Amino acid sequence: MKGPHDPSRLRRHPDWRRRDPDDRSGNADDVQIFNEADELIEVDKVVGPTRLTIVFACPPQLRGRAKFRYYFETFGDPVVP
């Protein structure tokens, strides 16, 4: 994928659409972006390889494997304990 990306638009798949506007489940709640010197930077969009730290809101019953979605592309396979 080319162009600038907005990491806050990442969603946990398949819950990438909000059913209830107050339900934050599946959203990227806390996004931190770091530069090449590992310093925290304040930007809205990133281009190219970037180190991120992202905290997702997940329901307590989520167990096993998860995937992520960025608009129409899914990726990743982390294991949720």
Image: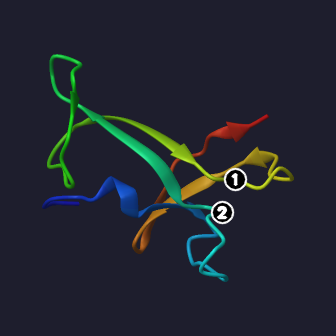
Q: Residue at x 18, y 47 (%)?
A: 43
Is disc 1 surrounded by few (<14), some (14 to 19) or many (20+) residues within 10 Å?
some
The amino acid pointed to by label 1 is Cys
Left or right: 36 as drawn, with respect to 80: left
Vertical arrangement, residue 36 with respect to residue 49, above or below: above
Left or right: 46 as drawn, with respect to 77: left
For the N terminus, give its image quadrant.
bottom left
Q: Residue at x 60, y 45 (%)?
A: 77
> Residue 33, located in which quarter of the rendered image?
top left
Is disc 2 surrounded by few (<14), some (14 to 19) or many (20+) residues within 10 Å?
some
Left or right: 72 as drawn, with respect to 55: left
Left or right: 41 as drawn, with respect to 62: left
Q: Position of residue 71 (x, y in %)?
A: 39, 72
Mark 1 or mark 2, earlier in chain: 2
Image disc number at residue 21: none
Residue labelled with disc 1: 58
Element class at badge 2: loop
Q: Position of residue 41 (x, y in %)?
A: 19, 34
Are discs 1 and 2 less than 8 Å apart at CB?
Answer: yes
Residue closer to the observer: 24 or 70: 24
The amino acid pointed to by label 2 is Ser
Separation (CA) of disc 1 from disc 2: 5 Å
Image disc number at residue 25: 2
Q: Residue at x 79, y 34 (%)?
A: 81
Element class at badge 1: loop
Residue closer to the observer: 46 or 67: 46
Residue closer to the observer: 21 or 2: 21
